[in-house]
Structures are given as C-alpha cells and as structure tokens.
Image: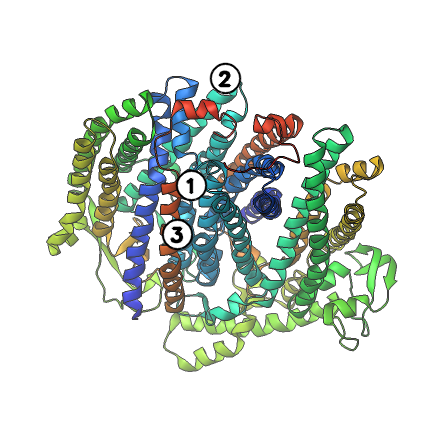
Amino acid sequence: MDVVELSRLQFAATALYHFLFVPLTLGLSILLGIMETVYVMTGRAIWRDMVKFWGALFGINFAMGVATGLTMEFQFGTNWAYYSHYVGDIFGAPLAIEGLMAFFLEATMIGLFFFGWKKMSRVSHLAVTWALALGTNFSALWILIANGWMQFPVGARFNVDTMRMEVTNFMDVLFNPVAQAKFVHTVSAGYVVGSVFVLSISALYLLRGKHVELAKRSMTVAASFGLASALSVVVLGDESGYMAGLNQKMKVAAIEAMWNTEPAPASFTVFGIPDLKTHTTHYEVKVPWVLGLIATRSTDTPVLGINDLVWLAKIRIRNGLIAYDDLLKLKKDRSDESVRRDLDAHVDDLGYALLLKRFRPDIQNASEEEINLAAESTIPNVPVLFWSFRFMVGLGFYFIALFAYAFYLSAKRKFPGSRTFLRVALYSLPLPWIAAELGWIVAEYGRQPWVIEGVLPTALGVSSQSVGNVTFSLLGFVVFYSVLLVADIFLLTKYIRLGPDGTLGHPVADPSDRVVTE
Amino acid sequence: MDYDTLRIIWWALLGVLLIGLAVMDGFDLGTAILLPFVAKNDLERRVVINTVGPVWEGNQVWLILGGGAIFAAWPPLYAASFSGFYLAMFLVLLALILRPGGFKYRSKLQSPVWRTTWDWALFVGGFVPALVFGVAFGNLFMGVDYGLDSDLRLHIGITLLSLLNPFALLAGLISVAMLTLHGATWLAIKADGLPGQRARKVVPYAALAFVILFTIAGVWTRSLDGFRITSDFVADGPSNPLLKTVARVPGGWWENYSAHPLYWIAPLVAYLGALIAVLASRTKGTVIAWIGSALVPAGTIATAGLSLFPFFLPSSTHPDASLTVWDASSSKLTLEIMLGATAVFLPIIIAYTSWAYSVLRGPVKAESIMSDSHGNY
C-alpha cells in the first residue's frame, strides 16, 4: 500500500472509532438533561439517581470520545498536510471555533457534572448538565460546518499567489445548506443512538425483573425522545439527500447505482446487484418517481446517471487543464494580468484537472486515454454505497417502528409490555451504531475521489510521509484503540451488570421519595 | 485593520494560547509526573488524582484549541509542524490518549494491578507530552529539515532521531522541570495531608533545576546559528514563504534582544516566577506560589517567541522556505473572523472556567474520597 491508501485507511479507522462514542455522547447528554429537569421540577430522588446512573455510563463513553477526538484534531496536519495548506484558510476556522464555543464548554461542564452534585444548588447543577448537552451539540454543529464545506465548498476561491483556496464569504461557509442538513441529520442520529442505548439496557433490567422503577421511567423518556429523533433522522436524512442532489450528483447516482439518466421523475431502486464492469445493475426492483422526488423535489427535472456525469467530468477536466496551463505560466511570470484573467475564468475546474495527477505528474501533457481514466475515476465505489445506504435507511425505518411501539405502550400506560418486545428492544442495542457508521461511509466514502468535492482530489491531500511512518502509526492506533475499546466495553458491561444500586454505591431511591434539602 | 497588524496580533495570540496551555494543562501534566513520587498508597494516589480530576478535561481543551487556532490562523505552520514532527506527535497523542482512561477508569475497579497500570499510564501521559513539547520547541531554534516546491507542497526530511539533538533535549528537560514545578505548587494547595506536603518539598528543587537548565539554554543559543530575512519582504503580502530569502547568522537568536532591551523582561519574568514559587511555599502551599510557577512557563514561552520572531519554523536545509509571521498566515478575512470569534468567546471561557474553579475550591481530603468512593476518581 502507498502513503495515500495508508493515510486514508488510518483516517477512516480513527474516524469510525471516534464515531462509535460521539453519537452516544450527543444523545445521552440530552437524555440526562431531560431526566434531571424532571428531578428538579418534581424533587423525586429516583430521577436524580437515574441521572447519576446513566451519567456514570455517559462518563465511561465520554472518556473514549475525548481520547479519540484528539487524534482527529491533529490528523489533518500530521497526515493531510497538503490538504491543510490548501484549504486551511476555510476549514481551520470552524475547527477553531468549535474549540472556543463548544468543546471548552463541554469539557469544563463535564467535571462539574460529576463533581458538583454536593457543591452547588439543584438548579445550578441542572444548568451545568444542559450546558454540557449544549456544548456537545454545538461541537457537532461546527464539525459538520467544516465537513459540509468538504461536500459543498461554497464561499471560497483559489488564490494563485498563495497556491490555496481562500475564504471569500464566511457567511456562505457558515450557512452552507449542506452543512445545516448534515448537522440536523447527524445529531438526530446521535439522539437515536442514545435513546436505543437507554431503551435496551432498561429492557434488560425489566426482563430480569431488576431495578424496575428506574428502568420503566428511563424507558418512557427514551421512547418519546427516541420516536421524535427517529422521525427526524429520516426526514432530515431526506433533506441531506436533496442537498446532495444539488451538488454531489455523482454521489446520488452511485447510491442509486443509476448508470444512465432516466426520464424525469426518476425511479428509486429498492434492490439490485450493481456491476462495475458493464455499468449495469442486475435484478433491479424499482419504485417509480421516488428518486426524482427526493433528489430534485420536482417531477420534471431529470436525475443524471453515472455515464452522463463521467462525460461532464471529461469536459471539466479539459477546462481545468486550461487553468493548470495558466498556473504554470504564472509561476514563471506572476505579473501577467491577461493570464490571471484567463485563470479566473477557468479556475472552478482546476480541481478536475488535478485528478490527472494520479496518472502522470506533468498533467498538461495528458493523453486522451488518461483524460478518460481520470473522468472514470470520479465514480465512487457503487456497490458499497448502494448497500450501505439501503441498510442505513432500512434501519432508520426500523427505529421509527420500534420507538412508535414503545411510545404507544407508554402512552397507553401498558409499560413495560410483553417479554417479546423487551427482547427485541434489548437485541436492537448494536443497530443504531451500525446505522451511524454506515451513514459515515455513505457521506465520506461516497465523496471519493475528492477530499474537497470538485476542488482537491484525496490523493493530493496527503503529507510527504514515509510508508514506514504511516504504517507504524496506523498499526499503533489500531492496537492502542482496540485495547482501550476492550477496557471501555468491559467497564460498561460491568457497570450495567452492577446496575444502578452498585454503581451509585447505595440503593436507588423509592419512587415516592422526595428530596427536600440536599 | 491592516494585514500586517493582524498577523502580529495572531502571533501574540498564538503565544497566549501556548501560555494558556502551559499554565492550565501544565499543572495537571505536572501533577501526573509527580503522582508516583508524592503518593505512597492507593488513597494518597486518589487524593492526587482527584485534585485535577474535575478540571483536566477543560484544561486539555487549550491543546485542542491551540491545534485548531494554528490550523485556522497559520495553516502552513499547522501543516509543517504536525507532519514534520510526525512520530513525535504520534507519541504525544498516544500518551494523551492514556489520560482519559487513567482518570475515568482507574478507580472503577478494585484490582491493584488495574489501578497501578493506570497510575503509570497517567505518569506517561504527563511526562511524555511535557518532554516532547519542549523538544519540539528546542528544535525551532535549530531549524528542521524541510522544503517547499512551487505548489507549496512540503517535503519533509525530519526523522525522530534528528529531533533528539542535545539542545532540543535540554529544552525538553526545561519543559519537564517547569511543569513539575507548576504541578507541585498546585498539589501543595489542593492535596490535603502528606501528598501535598511532599509536593511542596519538591518546589525548590524543581525551581532550581529550571533556573539552571534555562540559563544554560539561554547561553547556548548565543552560539547557535539564528535566522534572518535578508531580502525585502512585504509584511502585508500574500502568504507564500518562497517570496523571500533567508540567511543563517551566528548568534542571530540574540539580535531581537540587542535591538529591543525591553524584551529582557520575558526571561526576568520566568526567573522571578521561580523565585516567587519558592518563597511563597516555604511554610504551606499558597495561591501566590502557584501564580509564581505559572509565570515560569509564561516567561519561558515569551522568551523563546521574542527570540525567534518573526520566524515560527525555520528550515535548516532550505532557509528561504522558513515559515515566518509575514508569510505563513491565513487570508486577511480569516484572521479578522477568527479575531472576532476569539474576542467574543475567550472572555466567556475565562468567566465560566473561573466559576468552575470557585465551585471546586478547597483542598481534596482523604476522608471525602472515602466517604464518596463511587463519586470520585
């Protein structure tokens, strides 16, 4: 493997690891806020014990989120140095603001959340818990503003004097519609993870007839919050789909394995076996109209197929080569104004010309064959996207059904329901993580071959690192993270087994207990 | 505001962030370094750990913010330093990743093997970053092996061994000494009983070690080759490091101090801080002593920054490609936006951080840990 492949593998591995912990933090922080609000409003001690018990599990998970998050903040510099140089002017700002506005708040409040119970008033502690939840969610906002810009690079322009992209309109970066859609979709997914976590573990206790009062109340909260989140994750996922349809047409076509442009409105392929060699999809089962409606929100706009998009890419590569030629001239003579004007006219396609760098360094001499290859390279891995997307969406609808039924039970006061329901709820525990990881794969693997869509090919973004260095760090991360993950799961399991009584070191309060003074 | 003024402000803000990191995260790194030496049994170790338990996560954000701010304000520096110091950064990361487990997981099981393992993990998580950050700083004075091609792509020749030169190792030891000192004054206030008393006794030794090492390093820089921009340069020009020429000048790192005698305040602050730390902790731990030990990294970082100015990361092999304040920044617009964001959020951060520390005021006692064994680390 070369440095590009190793660096990509390391980024994917560390990001997927990080994303095991982040969604639970996002969801559980809000659930803790809700539970503690009930406690402060009713004064019933059992709700305080619920916050402390779920809080202990939250803490174990949070530690891993912080540990793996450090790597993410540094990895752009260590392994993606040219990327950092090329887009740092835009991409760095949301990361820094994330630290200023969100992570500082989150990290300061987590200490007070655990250590502040006896040191402040009930209302102050509640404020700390909500500040913690707010910080966590703001953090996701800024990270997704940064990520949204990778998918849809608005508000920036190439500057030939500094050889990089520079921001021209920060408001466009901030209010990037793709970033907004991705933010709400991703935090909703986190809320689903948190809700399923609480629902499943509560189901375990109810199945065993232990900690019944705490489990029933936890389940009620998880059911209503989970239903709202599961609905929003699917609806807002649809918004993400529409936004991708505006900008990342190739991603949408690849998810659909749609090789040829269909007459509008395009149909949605529920099942099929995509064939990369022949550019066809076998055994297709299609639902008319659906894709056209999702991707274009109209009945008369066609959704472009992969073959047509490759043809368009070829045009943009040729156009980009004009910009690249201007760039070479400007390196010799920076003052030539007419060349600068010509570059300005073609610079939006410069990134497409850079796709040729994979095939030869002197891309201005690229052959017709190489241009074809570069255009073909804009097709992401169709079968992986096709199936990842379908499993993710399928799971999304499953969560709606699961929470709808749980919510029905709780509204009709038929909790905890049948043992079958409890078993289903328990065994659903890993599913939201699978859905979240698949979502990452659809969004980021589906962006390939670009690291910044249409601007910078992934292969060009890497650092000039030796294969040995990156192999060493990759292996180091895998081994190290795995050991920590084992410790994390071991502790979570132990504390779930110990149950609330063992975790708190005292029996959980009776439902009728009220806290008068602390 | 002018582009060159913004660049100066962001150079100063980078210093503020590094000092914030050394002062705030520094004392919990120092505390972790002292952990095996000032605490003799499990309860004492828990006392030490719980002095920083509620605050280390907030403190560590200075590091994350530092990374983010360098990325946003000085992208070429972020790219060159993080990829250039690749294996060193990797070591720091692994060491820091040990810390969350050390705090959060350690006391969740009774097993002595489990706890001892995490205690050493905490020590490594304090010692290694303290050492490596210092080594990295020392290498700025030596210059490192990298160049830039006409696409401004970095070509790195740095190896881990090349970073471990004598001067850089000395800088690493300075960093360890000053953070140990800072951790000791913290523990003297916050750790009740024997651990706090033992930490207080470390203060004069750590301060003396710092003073000696810092003085040696200062004298040593006199005989190092400094760097100087030899061509005309435009202070508000585009951020392209290849538009200037640079030469190596024997003793060049002292030029700024010759030109601006006021700069000598920076090393004086470091010496004075060490003195205050020693004098103010003669009988018991005091906040004055902690402020003194906080002045040590502040003065040290300022001393180094003023000496290097306008250089960030000089290249030993391609001096012209050296990154400086004038050619390694973000665009003017990004610097403006980030300055606005910092002006809004930094006071808010300082406000709620101060509130958190006031809520958590008072020493950590062994009795309170025993009485709430599940609530503490």
Distance from Cα at disc 3 to Cα at disc 1: 27 Å
Badge 1 amino acid: Met
Amino acid type, mark 3: Ile
- Residue B156 shows in this picture: no
Res B112 label? 2
Foreground mark, 3 or 1, reads: 3
The local secondary structure at tag 3 comes to: helix
Q: Would you say the residues marked 1 and 2 are in contact, meaning their CB atoms lie under 8 Å apart?
A: no
Mark 2 or 3, nearer chain start? 2
Q: Position of residue B89 (x, y in %)?
A: 42, 41
Residue type marked 2:
Pro
Residue hosting label 3: B349
Percent position of residue A280, x then y: 82, 60
Q: Is residue B114 visible?
A: yes
Q: Residues within 10 Å of mark 1 (few under 14, many from 20)?
A: many
Does the CB distance between marks 2 and 3 fall below 8 Å? no
